[in-house]
Structures are given as structure tokens and as C-alpha cells.
Amino acid sequence: MTGAVTRLYRARCDAGELSPDPAQEAVLPALDRLAAALGPAPAAPRLGRLFRKPPGSPRGLYLWGGVGRGKSMLMDLLVTAADPVPRRRVHFHAFMQEIHAGMTAARRRGVEDALAPVAQSVAAAVRLLAFDEMQVTDITDAMLVGRLFEMLFAAGVTVVTTSNRPPGDLYRDGLNRGLFLPFIALLEARLEVIELAGPTDWRQGRIAGAPVYFHPAHTARARIDALWQDFGGAAAHPLVLTVGGRAVTVPAFANGVARASFWDLCAQPLGPADYLALAQAVRVLILEDIPRLSSENYNEAKRFVTLIDALYEARVRLVASAADEPERLYLEGAGSFEFARTASRLREMQAEGWGKDRDAAP
């Protein structure tokens, strides 16, 4: 009998939304087994809920491989197939920001072990926790994730995650990495590690050889809409990043691709930390309706420069629609001379293959 995830995958292939990929198909049996093992949880008697031992959880999955291979798409199919199991799909970076914010709030209440109530709150809400893009680069996260995951596993939460690296390469060369190694062992014990080793980078393939900078903007709507749907935009959801205790919301996010207007990102009181968090969280940004800029919207222009710098340094692929060519976007006003660097970067980011080397470094 065909499993639930395989049925969803084949339906999308039949509808022309996906192209069959042998590497992806090889992963489907493991996803099917997990979807079946989760199943609906039997209801516990009301009086026993507070005292019962958490049910054993099915072994989770750690799906890793190169960028654009379809890891996020496959995980999303599993999350869909697991309905009505209480579940949540969240970007790993955003989730860790939430954990830090929750711990800060717990400390303000005088809680001695600030992580415990935060982990309990997560475990009370879900049986399946799906993380996209697990990567650990921050020493604070590295020292925290081991205890956090132990608490989630002990509470019966099943974890599924995607990553560009195998568990053993997480936090490579990080400060005090020896303290992080037990977490790697925990992942390998509690999650089935599967490499998605397909040769095709579907995300780059959708852009390869195609224009990625459109002007004037109004001529590009249909082409960008088609590209967005090809990236999986039909299943998009807002991306909420917590930065310094504030919520930064990107209107639409799917399969590592974010879509927003210039005004969503540059007309709001955002700063370098916000744009850095965004650049870490996405692989491709579709940025629409960049206007001609002047001294009248200097603040917006300054934010735009900061955003492009963050995307450039993080090697994020950019698809943009604008009122004019990069060199003509900001011709007068404070900083217009320096804007030449931003225009140059916008040109460079249009090159085919931009962003392919984002994950080349260990």
C-alpha cells in the first residue's frame, strides 16, 4: 500500500508541480513510515494527563544534502501527511530566537531554570516539530540545543529537520565544540540520518539562464508570480524572525524562498541585525517594487543599502523588480555617490550561479 507522503508526492508530479527525482523518491519510504508511525494519539483520561508518562515517540529524521535538492519540500509533504497530529513547521533560526525570547521572559519571572518552562510549552503544543535549515553558528545556541532537545525527546516530541550538512559537521570549528559533541551523538541516536544526494539543484535550475532583475517593475508581475509558484508559493506562510526581542515578519516564505515588497522591508524601522537574520534564514529573496529613490526617502534608501549588503555577504540569491536599472535608482540625495557600490552589487548578484557557493565553506 502506498504511503501518505508518496501519494502527495505523486499527485504533485502528476499535476506538473514537481518533476520526478530519483533521489527524492528514495527518501519517500522513510517519510511514509514516520507519517504512519505518528498517527493520531489516543486521548488520555482528563485526570491522568497531569501524571501520565509521556508516550514514546517515533524516531525522527535528519534529512541533509546540498542546497536546492528538495529537502524542505519533502519535509513539508510529511507535515501535511501527518494531519491531524499536532505539529509545527518552523525555520530553525527563528525557533531558536523564540527560545531565547521565552527564556528571557522566564528569567524576568524569577524562574531558576529558564529553559524548562519554554521546552514544556513547546512540547505541550506539538507531537511533531519540523525544523528547516538546521545550522548552529552561535556559541549561545550551541550550549543550549542539547538540553532543549533532551527535554523535547523526553516529552514525546518527534523531531524532523533539514540541513545542508550531516550532524557531524554541525558547528564545525566552533568555540568550545567539544561541549557540543554530545548533541551530535543525541541527534544520531534519536533521528534517522538520510542524505538527499541528488545531482540536481532545483532552486538554481529554476533561475539558471533566466532574468532575475526586472524593470520597470509593473512588467514583471506575471513572471515573478510564475516563478513564485514554481518555488512552492502555494504553500507559503509568513516568516517571523525574533531579533532583539522584536518580531520581524516577511509576508511570504516557502522552501527557503522569501517574497516581500521593498516597502515591507525598507519602509519599516529595521536595522542591520534584522537584515542579517533575514539573510541567514533564506536562500532566495524575491524583492518587488523597488522605487526610484531620492533625498525624500533617504531612510528607505539607507535601509535598502544595508539590506543588499547583508544579502550580498550571505550569498543570498536575489530576484528583484524595480522602477529602473540599478545605476538609476538613486541619483540625488545624501549617500547617492556611495550608492554606486550597491548598484554594482545588484549587477553582480544577477550573474548566473550567484549564491551557489553559499554552503561551500565548512
Image: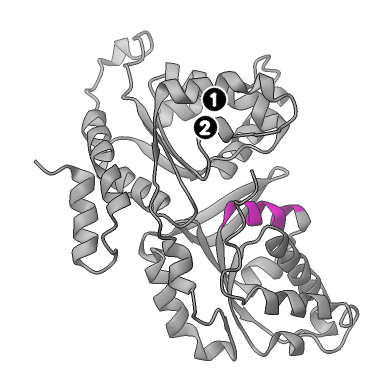
The answer to if 208 sits in the magenta stretch is no
What residue is pinned by disc 1?
A: 184
In front of the other: 279 or 267: 279
- Near mark 1 (Cα within 10 A), the count class, few <14, some 14-19 or many ≥20, is some
Mark 1–mark 2 CB contact (< 8 Å): yes
The answer to if 277 sits in the magenta stretch is yes
Corner quadrant of residue 117 = top right
Figure quadrant of the C terminus = top right
- Compared to 170, does 202 lie above or below? below
In front of the other: 263 or 77: 77
Can residue 99 be seen in the rendering of this structure? yes
Task: Examine the residues drawn in magenta and state their main secondary structure.
Answer: helix
Q: Residue at x 32, y 16 (%)?
A: 55
Can residue 40 be seen in the rendering of this structure? no
Scheme of colours in the image: one colour
Where residue 46 appears, x then y in whole percent?
29, 16
Where residue 152 appears, x then y in whole percent?
47, 23
Figure quadrant of the N terminus = top left
Corner quadrant of residue 179 = top right
What residue is pinned by disc 2?
A: 167
Magenta region: which residues?
273-282
